[in-house]
Image (spheres, grey):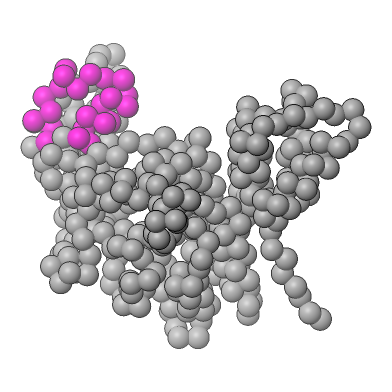
Amino acid sequence: LVVTELDLPDVTELDRVLRMLENAPGLNLKTTKEERNRLLQAALGLTSEQALRVFAKSIVNDGKLDVDDLDVIAEEKRAIIGREESFEYFPTSMVQVEVGGLDVLKNWVKQRETAFTAEAKQYGIPYPKGVALLGIPGAGKSLVAKHISKIWRQPLFRLDISSLLGMYVGQSEAKIRKALKLAEAVAPCILWIDEIEKALPGNESGPSSRILGYLLSWMQEKTAPCFVVATANNIEGLPPELFRKGRFDEVFFLDLPNPAERKAIAIVHLEKRGRDPENFDIYRIVQASDGYVGSEIEQAVLDAMFVAFSENREFTTDDIVESLSNQIPMSKSHQQVIAQTRTWVKEGRARLAS
């Protein structure tokens, strides 16, 4: 028995699918060249049959197929790809995040915003390969992955490494091949490999070892504009070959936020909840949140809101400070991890994101 894996259709093949619909009796579909390209790009990652169904559903909704249907295609695509247990799909329209601080990292991302254009290729710039983000949970690594998707206006795929581990021989390898083929098919895109340390081999011949080996080879040799964002909470045991140049363009460490970043984070979360930061003593919040990561500051704001709402009043700076004092920050529970990663930075193996 010979098993042949078929690639997902490219833009040319999807264009043939669309032309089949256009030539169907009773339909009079007219799209501009730009609209057509955007519709076809939106459908990348679907099989020909799936694309045909999605296009047809869009036509049934309003009798036409145009850029107004991009959200319909994106939602259908998210539902289809969402059935893949290892993937979570975020269309560009769904990625709305604000990141406080991390100015060095955000500037690095901004400089590469146009690196996927024809002009960049003509200039001689290769596609950016990826970035590794190290730091304790809550430091903002997940937000950065979504931030890159938002700034570059590219779809984001979250790959859950642990879900690739199969019970049977060859199952894990088949899953990782399928996942990476899907990512390549929808490129340009952002492939977010969350908690890559979960792929660390428990033994040299186990499935996790084979997954990591396949992943490293793919990252080194890939030619598709598929930008990898790999996050890790714990660098202990991470193989040196993972961070070799050619796999990642840069390795960043997201340290505990400094005072300026804590101020930016507090303002982001107050504004996100419809509050004017001018009504709060931001300096007190910054002082009280020393040693806290962004997610802990956000949680303090939420806890303060719950307390105040239960008492039928508006929450205040005192409520936020009180909520912070009731938390045990990760800077205390993850002291060893932070110290170890800071050593990496001092050795020149990673850059500070701030």
Q: Nearer the viewer, residue 210 or 336?
A: 210
Assess whether residue 276 is covered by the magenta stretch.
yes
| Residue at the front extreme, as displayed | 122
Prevailing SS of the magenta stretch? helix
Q: Which residues are magenta?
A: 264-286
Residue at figure coordinates x 20%, y 35% from the top left = 264
Q: Is residue 255 above or below residue 169?
A: above
Return the x and y of residue 64 as percentages of the image width and height: 75, 26
- Looking at this view, name the residue that lies furthest to the right: 25
Left or right of residue 287: residue 107: right
Question: How many badges with numbers are in the image?
Answer: 0
The answer to whether residue 119 is left or right of residue 108 is right
* Residue 251 in picture, x, y percent from top left: 28, 63
Q: In the image, residue 315 lies at what x, y percent?
A: 22, 20
Q: Quick one: which residue is furthest to the top in this view? A: 312
Residue found 83% across the figure and 42% down from its top: 20
Residue sitting at x 25%, y 14%: 313
Q: What quarter of the picture does the N terminus occupy?
A: bottom right
Residue at 16% over, 35% down = 263
- 274 shown above or below 154: above
Rendered image quadrant of residue 200: bottom left
Q: Quadrant of residue 59?
A: top right
Is residue 58 among what the camera can see? yes
| Residue 333 seen in the figure | no
Q: Quadrant of residue 35?
A: top right
The spot of residue 133 in percent (x, y) is: 31, 58
Residue 26 lies in the magenta-colored region? no
